[in-house]
Image: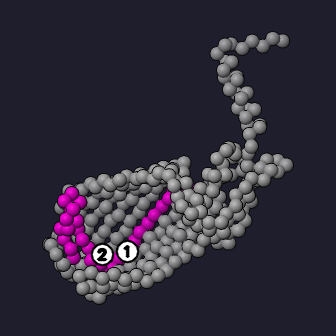
Amino acid sequence: MLIIFKRGWIPVLLLIITNIFTSLWSEQVSSILIEGPKRTREETLLQIIAVKPGDEIDETFLEDVEQRLRKSGLFQEEMDISLVPQEKGTELHITVYDRWTLLGFPIFSASDGNWSAGLFFIDSNLGGRANLLLSSVMYGSEGNLYAFGVFRDPSFLESDFAFTTRISGGRNRTQITDLAEEEVRADFVADSMVLGFGTGQTIRDRLDWRVSVEGEYLNMVNAEVVTGELPEDGGSLNLEGRLSFDDQKVSAVFARGVKASIQGKTFWSPGDRPELNLTG
């Protein structure tokens, strides 16, 4: 029997045959062995390295895995990453040790004869899931009490998107600045409540985008003026977006490469037009 292919089918046939042979002889990850971490969960580490059985192994595979682990900031400088041949495929061996990520320390500030003091806590690996938690409580010489908290989940609902929320409240000193003229229009002390949300995504280890919205409510009934005039309406809305590029190579000692970002902010309060500020 003679099979005749039209000329237009020959390139397609060659491409199919090439893909079949490439998949048969290319080196692939058959399994992953993780040793060392006591606090970080295995599923969290797998999300960080973004590797699963069946992934192909190329010449930059080990370096890419190491960079993702180092950039996470969760592990000590000493780590071992290797490929071990098995009967069926290649096993990825990872040995890392948790870095101490829970910190707490006192903070103090003073300005214009007034002072404030408090405690600051940070945990960048909350629950072993690489979640970030910031919290602080401050008390000032004028009897002002203020607290805030920030929570960030780098893989919200096990997706590629990060989610950040911020909440704060108390009696606090607030400054309203004209972004265009870079001058303070009002400086006062008032009861405030801030609530903000943000999301973002990292694309191919290098490109990172973030957007956030934050609203603030100010109770002007018992506000005290420092300079300027009190705003009639106590509220504001802040929108922020950021696009960053990170092509740094992080070693156990230092980082080298290129890192750049552009950031845009717009601030709006009742009675004012929105103001846009771009920085890079």
Question: In the figure, residue 57 lies in which quadrant?
Answer: top right
Residue 60's place in the image compared with 166, above or below, is above
Instruction: Say how many tags the image has.
Output: 2
Q: Residues within 10 Å of mark 2 (few under 14, many from 20)?
A: many
Nearest to N terminus: mark 2 or mark 1: 1
24 or 79, nearer to the observer: 79
CA–CA distance in space, label 2 to label 1: 8 Å
Is residue 179 something one can see in this rendering?
yes
Identity of the residue drawn at 40% across and 71% down: 167
C-beta proximity under 8 Å, tags 2 and 1 = yes
Secondary structure, magenta segment, majority class:
strand
- Give x and y (percent) for residue 233: 20, 69
Residue located beneath label 2 in the image = 192
Which disc is residue 168 wearing? 1
Residue 194's place in the image compared with 21, above or below, is below
Identity of the residue drawn at 38% across and 65% down: 196
Question: In the figure, residue 190 lies in which quadrant?
Answer: bottom left
